[in-house]
Amino acid sequence: MPFQTIVTSPTEILDLLDVPALLLSNDRVAHANQAALTMFGRHIEGQDVRIALRHPDAIELLTSDRNDNVRVSGLSTNGSLWQIDCNTLADGSRLVTLTDLSVQESVARAHADFVANASHELRTPLAGILGYVETLKDAKAGDNEATRLRFLDIIAKEANRMQALVEDLMSLSRIEASKHQLPTESVDLIAIARQTIGETLSSERIQLEANISEAEISGDASQLAQVVRNLIENALKHGGTDLPVIVNVEKGSTGWISLSVIDKGDGIAPQHMPRLTERFYRADPGRSRQIGGTGLGLAIVKHIVERHRGRFDIASRLGQGTTATCIFPPS
């Protein structure tokens, strides 16, 4: 059977595209596909392209004879980034396609920020270590027993800080590598919480409460233990000396399992709340570094909970403490 040639008009081709696309004739929008109509509005058809797009760089390209592309920002929403490709067809009309680069640009920017922040976090303790080592090489400091021991304690503290940061960075990398793999093992969240509490140095300050005897979910036991450990360590550090920390596990009416870690500390100011799970963000940078925080603990918790198809939330009021809650679907 011979092949049939199907003749398709440019407008029909445009309508098959998922990206916004326009057909221009004499600097007017002769046709817009559905994606373009959704983006700009149905009134765009028939409009002068200078009125339809209202972006100087885009207009300069689209009203010229050049077959080229240009990147413009803010075309759809503030902060968005689009690439506009324009080519002249055989009949003299102009084919315009728009590609949204916003997510790609955001990921690239986040990656660059992450590398810069990680480098800064490692550079600070490393500079301290090198400085104190140089000082100890000096006979006046190195031969003084009290000074030498004090400097060695500082070096050990900075080295431990670097080690903790590297371990958290590696942990975050492993979690992100497996984020699309849903855990299938059936685990008991109460048993994980009980074991993690038992391994905690200040376990006498921690109270485990539960309204059920077992809390079965589909999960990665080691990652869930890391969630509990990170939240408990945060609560112990920021919850006030000798004040109790409560780990509460409950099963709701919908079957979802919640794990909350509650402290009675000073609480967190409202302006910090939206950014607490950002990597390296600290509500109190000086105090956090002093008590050994890497700024990655809550980011790790968020990524693990998301891998388990759960939700993570933090509630806090100044002077009344903080509650960090993870909610997981039942197994």
Image (cartoon, rainbow, N blue to C red):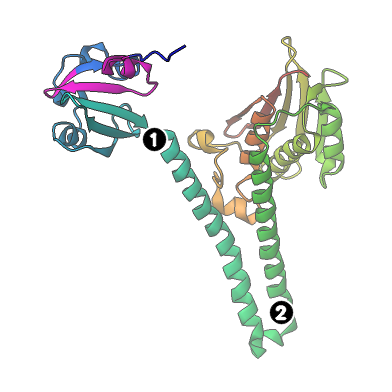
What is the secondary structure assignment of the residue under circle 1? loop
Sort mark 1 into few (<14), some (14-19) or many (20+) by Cα contacts within 10 Å.
Answer: some
158 vs 200: above or below: below
Foreground disc of the pair 1, 2: 1
Task: State the image quarter where residue 137 is shown.
Answer: bottom right
Up the image or down, 254 lies above or below 26; here it is above
Q: Residues within 10 Å of mark 2 (few under 14, many from 20)?
A: some
Quarter occupied by residue 166: bottom right
- Report the residue at 66% width, 60% height from top: 162
- Badge 1 vs badge 2, beta-carbon distance below 8 Å: no
Amino acid type shown at disc 1: Leu
Q: Mark 1 points at which residue?
A: 101
- Whether the magenta-drawn stretch holds residue 57 is answered as no
| Circle number at residue 188 | none
Which residue occupies 68% across, 68% down?
A: 154
Is 8 placed left or right of 195 in the picture? left
Residue that numbered label 2 is attached to: 148
- Classify residue 28 as left or right of residue 238: left
Task: Confirm whether residue 20 shows in the render.
Answer: yes
Q: Measured from the top left, where is residue 300 in percent x and y?
A: 65, 40
- The residue segment tinted magenta is 7-29
The foreground one among 162 and 315 is 162
Q: Position of residue 195 (x, y in %)?
A: 87, 37
Residue 285 x, y percent position in the rendering:
55, 51
Q: What whole-number distance in Å separates the C-alpha atoms at marks 1 and 2? A: 55 Å
Residue 42 is situated, as x and y percent measured from the top left of the image, at 26, 11
Does 175 sit left or right of 216 as displayed? Answer: left
Viewer-side residue, 185 vs 133: 185
Viewer-closest of 85 and 146: 85
Q: Can see residue 291?
A: no
Question: Mark 2 falls on what kind of element?
Answer: helix
